[in-house]
């Protein structure tokens, strides 16, 4: 039986997947904030959706809850920022 290497185990880990997806969402929101265009906002919303799915997955697996909780708070902040950008784009 092949043994998982440490890196592949970490990549597959629900809390790691959630952390990574929050980082991606963070980049997407920053992109939307610096370039408030419809496509950038849409991409950021998709990234946030993906991160929220990863959050649910991590919660179901009772992952390292302190890390998950910090990432969840960060995700909530990103959603607020993105909604502000969306309003700017809609007003243009």
Image (spheres, rainbow, N blue to C red):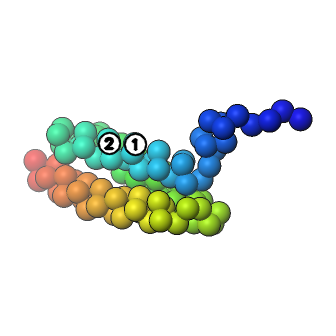
Q: Is residue 50 left or right of residue 90?
A: right
In this rendering, is residue 58 above or below 1? below
Q: Residues within 10 Å of mark 1 (few under 14, many from 20)?
A: some
Furthest toward the left, the residue is 92
Give percent across and percent down for residue 4.
Answer: 75, 37
Numbered tag placed on residue 28 in the rendering: 2
Q: Position of residue 12 (x, y in %)?
A: 63, 44
Q: Which mark is residue 24?
A: 1
Q: Residue at x 80, y 35 (%)?
A: 3
- The image shows residue 86, relative to residue 31, as above or below, that is below
Residue 28, image x, y percentages:
32, 42
Give yes or no for contact between labels 1 and 2 (Cβ–Cβ under 8 Å). Answer: yes
Question: For mark 2, does the 10 Å Cα neighbourhood hold few (<14), some (14 to 19), or many (20 or more) residues?
Answer: many
Q: Quadrant of residue 1?
A: top right
Q: Tell me the element at label 2.
A: helix
| Residue located 59% across and 41% down the image | 11
């Amino acid at each position: 039986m092949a043994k998982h290497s440490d890196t592949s185990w970490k990549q597959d880990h629900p809390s790691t997947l959630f952390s990574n997806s929050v980082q991606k969402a963070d980049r997407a929101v920053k992109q939307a904030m610096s370039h408030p265009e419809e496509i950038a906002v849409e991409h950021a919303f998709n990234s946030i959706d993906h991160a929220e799915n990863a959050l649910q997955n991590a919660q179901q697996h009772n992952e390292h809850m302190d890390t998950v909780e910090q990432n969840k708070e960060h995700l909530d902040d990103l959603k607020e920022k993105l909604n502000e950008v969306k309003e700017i784009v809609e007003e243009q």
